[in-house]
Amino acid sequence: MRHARRIGARENTEGSKVKRFLNRSGLALGAALAAACMAGPASAGEITIGHTIWVGYGPLYLARDLGYFKQGGVDVKLQVVDDNALAMAAEAAGRMNGSASTIDEILKYRSPHFCFKTVTVLDDSYGGDGIVVRDNINSLKDLQGKTVAINEGSTSQFWFSYVLLKQHIPLDSITFSNMSADDAAAAFIAGHVPAAVTWEPNLTLVKTKHVGKVLMDSRSIPGVIVDVLQLTCKTIQDQPKDVQALVDGVFRAVEYAKQHPKEADAIMAKGVGGYLSKPSDFADAEKGVRFYDHAMAVKYLGTTAQPGQIDDIIKLGNEIWKAVGKMKDTVTYPEVVDPHFVQTTH
């Protein structure tokens, strides 16, 4: 989960669909639906996007505040949402056009009743997430039979499960202790668990306190914890020019950030806000991610005929979330990815 504030919305005629998919996901329906009341359905020339507070969403604000979206003819409204469940509920209820989240997270919501697709890639974790262990643990196989503190149902669990499966280590060979990423780090530092999956700045804290080590982090396997921008199928169908302007604007912002990093950090920090509102804090957080430029996004998404790495994540996402009871339906690349806008960006 990402840090965030709460917004609201009201349920409309799509509410029954939201109830079905949220009930299947085991989420807090009442709070999720109540959260949509401040957002309204967008019209042509306007797109509303929900997101939690996360450094990887900075380019959205950069493109907005530099006027790139407006220059493309679209007014992009960005709404900070308390968590992904609330954003997805508002979107399913027709109160937002889409949201920014990790690809593994959105898989859990896709259904025949709730159609949305990824239109571009925003960032990936590049050292910002990792596994901390005691000094006597030297490999992933050494974790078998041990307890690992982890936020179950989160991107942390997805990433850790992905790593285990790639090493042919059964998920049931690990005992999981469910807690937030920050609490997992605290439990590890206090000596209550031999291992934990967490993120920065907790990884650095473990190193500086000399209470263990980072066994591995997301820099060693990039392209797994990936934030994407997804929009409803209705938005994609009814507003293709707006969607193209949105995607183009994000890529322009990423290029601006490459050329003017200090200026870009100041703009993005102010836009994203929250715990990242100071440019220095934003810059520190930025060290653990990679913003995706056009070439990277093209390669990662691929095409319908020849999908990119995202297809592997989707397939393993199905396997992992089904194994832990977070998904029932199988989701495929064509159902959750539309690479057209990245392929035709200009």
Image (cartoon, helix red, strand yellow):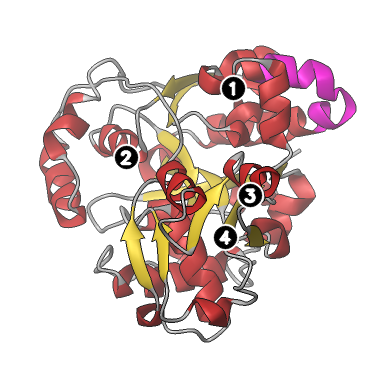
Identity of the amino acid at label 2? Met
- The amino acid on which the numbered mark 3 sits, given as a three-letter code, is Ser
Q: Quadrant of residue 174?
A: bottom left
Residue under label 3: 125
| Residue placed under numbered mark 2 in the picture | 88
Helix, strand or loop at mark 2? helix
**In the image, which is nearer the foreground, mark 2 or mark 1?**
1
Pointer 4 residue: 131
Q: Vertical placement of 132 versus 72: above or below?
A: below
The disc, 4 or 2, on the residue closer to the chain's N-terminal end is 2
Q: CA gap, disc 4 to disc 3?
A: 13 Å
Residue 217 visible in image:
no
Q: What span is in magenta?
A: 255-268
Q: CA distance from mark 3 to mark 2?
A: 22 Å
The residue that disc 1 covers is 276
Between 22 and 43, the residue placed more toward the observer is 22
Answer whether residue 47 is visible to the viewer in this image: yes
For marks 1 and 4, the one nearer the N-term is 4
> Is 324 in the magenta?
no
Left or right relative to 306: residue 189:
left
Q: Which mark is residue 76?
A: none
Name the dominant secondary structure of the magenta segment. Answer: helix
